[in-house]
Amino acid sequence: MIVASPKSVTELKNLIARHGKVLFVGCGTCVTVCLAGGEREVSIASYATRMARKIEGKPLELTQVTIERQCENEFIKDLADEVAKAEAIVSFGCGAGVQAIAERFPGKPVYAGLNTQFLGILEKQAVWTEKCLGCGDCMLAQYGGVCPVTRCAKRLLNGPCGGSTEEHCEVDADRPCAWQLIYARLRSIDQLDRLDSIVPPKDWRPAWHSGARKIVRKEHQV
Amino acid sequence: MTQTNSPHPRESEAREPKAWEPEIIAFCCNYCAYAAADLAGSKRMQYPNNVRIIHTPCTGKIEMEHILAAFEKGIDGMLVAGCLEGGCHFLEGNLRARKRTDRIRETLDEIGVGGERLKMVNLSAAMAPTFVQRVQEIVETVRALGPSPLKSPTQKVSAGKP
Ligand code: SF4
Ligand code: SF4
């Protein structure tokens, strides 16, 4: 899922400093699961921002609503009535959600209420870790299902770098060495032979290096 | 220490213009603080009457929104009183409450309300004197801080001492 983290109350307050009537929009999908932009987080942010503005002597009229998914027009269109009443919108979706809302309502300022971080998983309660950069040409088969593009600090495709200590990455001792994990994983599935082949330099063209990507699937088009 | 409990608050209110008195909410867990407050009452122990007790099934049941809503409405201070650590009837409700109150305290500091206005304490059902002491402490802390900046002008009659 997409993992995001909340902006501080001060940041939120500054984002909407010029507005008096604002709509806070939560998203019921990824950012609800990562406890950053769901109904409850939007509610807490609303209380805090309203109080901060009241103390400044600039009371804020704030409405909050959470839709199922901010990255789909099907759900965004339900916002139309509330959007019409507000001067500006703060979207607590991921960056895609913020932009989808901005596209749908061209005349309204739309601000991001979260910092979108990465594609990752819930490691344990309240701890999320990054697992994938969305490079567009997945190489996980070669590495036993552990992504060196994302999880090796040096993005080594033919690792390890030799700097790891006690299974920890030399760049950050809190992080496991991705290459240690790759080795352990290949050994446990009996595919260590994969390490005998040298992986050529990665072709980054399918990745983000040539601008925003687009996928068209003719078989599903109507 | 300022004595805050007048024997007949309503009478004195009727006679002179009302001075600001800290308004404090105490969320009290059913299994400890609420019983301790009850015991304090049975033992005729005096504690400041600025405190409004809200009976809670467990401090773990108090959502961050409950706390924020009270502050938004202009409450001057809040006590969250749960069981001793390790003694929660629901195992770790009080530990969760502590994390949540810590988080809200940061928010209150950030927005300029002041985190000291929110305090979490742990006690058992038998600790009536501790309950009274904790109430006195929060009243004193809040009195020193003055009225909440979120109090509306009509709520904030006077910031002076009674
Ligand atoms: S190889 Fe690319 S697509 Fe596959 S997990 Fe790593 S970053 Fe993601
Ligand atoms: S220690 Fe491991 S994860 Fe860290 S940079 Fe070196 S190979 Fe990559």
Image: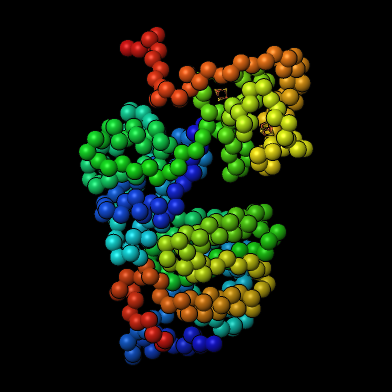
Quadrant of ligand 1 in image? top right
Residue drawn at point x = 30 percent, y = 65 percent = A57
Residue B100 falls left or right of residue A48:
right
Query: Which quadrant holds the C terminus of chain A?
Result: top left
Q: Is residue B43 visible?
A: yes
Q: Is residue A88 above or below residue A214?
A: below
Which residue is the extreme one toward the top? A219
Horizontal and vertical percent position of residue A119 = 52, 32
Residue drawn at point x = 37 percent, y = 61 percent = A51
Q: Is residue A222 above or below residue B106?
A: above
In the picture, residue A140 is in which quadrant? top right
Q: Is residue A191 above or below residue A174?
A: above
Horizontal and vertical percent position of residue A74 = 33, 28
Residue drawn at point x = 62 percent, y = 34 percent = A153
Residue drawn at point x = 46 percent, y = 76 percent = B145
In the picture, residue A201 is in which quadrant? top right
Query: What is the count of numbered marks?
Result: 0
Depth check: give the residue in front, B58 or A86.
Answer: A86
Horizontal and vertical percent position of residue B42 = 60, 79
Depth check: give the residue in front, A166 or B116.
Answer: A166
In the picture, residue B110 is in which quadrant? bottom left
Depth check: give the residue in front, A176 or A48.
Answer: A176
Residue A40 falls left or right of residue B86:
left
Q: Describe the colour scheme in one phrase.
A: rainbow
Q: Is residue B58 visible?
A: no
Horizontal and vertical percent position of residue B97 = 58, 58
